Structures are given as C-alpha cells and as structure tokens.
Image (cartoon, rainbow, N blue to C red):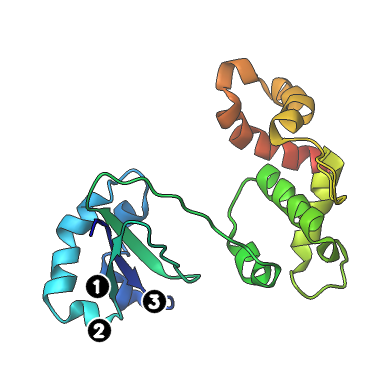
Amino acid sequence: RIFVGRWVLFPPGLDAAGMETCGLSKDEYLSKMTPPTRWWKEHYPLLSETDAGRTVGMVECIQEAGETIFVPAGWWHAVLNLDLTIAITANPLPPHSLRAVWPRMEWPALFLAKFACDCARAWPFLAVKETEVVEGDFWTAMEQGRRWGFSIEPGTEGLSIEEVLDTQAGALAQEAGFSIEERGTSTLILDADSVLRGSDEK
C-alpha cells in the first residue's frame, strides 16, 4: 500500500470562533504568501491531539495511490503529501451550482466576462435572461464579454483572453501609459481590468 496524502477537511459555515480554532482566521494563513506547511506545524497538532478538531467537525483521512477524493463545495481543506506525489485536480461546475458560485468569483472583469460567455456557450439556456439559474450581473458580464469579442454561440471559439488583450486592452493600456512588452501579459490582465471597465462605462 502506498500512502500519498493526508487530508484534513472542515465543514462550511464555521463561525468566527470555529475559524479561529481551525487556524483559518489569520490573514497570513489565507494569503498565498504563507507556506501551507506552517498550518500543519502550528495548528494540526492541536486539532488532532485534543478535542478541538472534533468540536469543529474536522474530518481526516489518508489517501492511497490511485484513490480519488471529492471535496464538497465550501469545505475548507488541507493536504500534506506523504510521498513523491503527482496530483490531478479539477473543479467541476454543473449549471445548478452557478447561482452559489458566481457571487463569490472575485476575478478581474476580463476573466468574469470570458467565464460568463464560456458558460453560455456550453449551456445555451444561460444566455436567456429569464432563466433562474443565475443573477442579473451574470448577463451583464456576458454582454460585456460579447462586446469585447468573446463568443456565446455553441460550437464556436471566439477570441481568447490574449487576443482580447491584444486588440482591446492593448490599445487602451498604451493610452494609459503602459504596454504589454513592459508589463507582461499576466500583469496587463490586472492593469487592463480597470481600463476596460472605464472604457465600457463611456
């Protein structure tokens, strides 16, 4: 038997005290700047060796080679590799989950617009405003994406984010005083977000 990962999961809906018990309330642990190993060293022993883990509903398991772990929506989780490990992860998003997921997507406008168009292309009924699956700002993002060149027509590709940056944000970014060559595409996506928002409001 080959053990590849130790999983710890916490249920959604924890109050402030529960978050504090789990070590999830400090900004340093929610920041990607802090190595996850610090949580395992500083918080996991307290949770696993006392009743604290049980009081917050902690679930723990060991994953073996070839096994799949399904993490329900909203569950906090941490994974510690126990051996040399290659993991494949996916975040499935069935249409009925979009109502809960969409309000939590704090992405730049460019990404939200493309995502909305991609969803409408995969599930055409989402392009109809009368559908009850999502809220109104989903269609706002979708229409914004269509204006920028993303497609919602099934079987079509439309423009990629890079192509939209080249055609739309590239020109606008240069007007704002920076260029793709100077800032790099990944940085430009964030910089161009405010520029694109401003151009859309004009």
> Of all residues shown, which one is farthest toward the top?
181
State left or right for residue 66 relative to residue 43.
right
Asked if 8 appears above or below 27 in the picture, the reply is below
In the rendered image, the quadrant that contains the C terminus is top right
Mark 1 touches mark 2? (CB < 8 Å)? yes
| Three-letter residue code for mark 3 | Pro
* Spatial separation of the CA atoms under disc 2 and disc 3: 11 Å
Q: Is residue 169 visible?
A: no
List x then y, in percent, for residue 195.
71, 35
Residue located beneath label 1 in the image: 21
Mark 3 touches mark 1? (CB < 8 Å)? no
> Of all residues shown, which one is farthest toward the front?
1
Residue located beneath label 2 in the image: 55
The first of marks 3 and 1 along the sequence is: 3
Answer with the quarter of the image where residue 64 lies: bottom left
The first of marks 2 and 3 along the sequence is: 3
| Three-letter residue code for mark 1 | Thr
Q: Of discs 3 and 1, which sits in the foreground?
A: 3
Of 145 and 154, which appears nearest the observer?
Answer: 154
> Of all residues shown, which one is farthest toward the left?
49
Judged from the image, the secondary structure of the residue bearing numbered disc 1 is helix
Judged from the image, the secondary structure of the residue bearing numbered disc 3 is loop
Asked if 32 appears above or below 27 in the picture, the reply is above
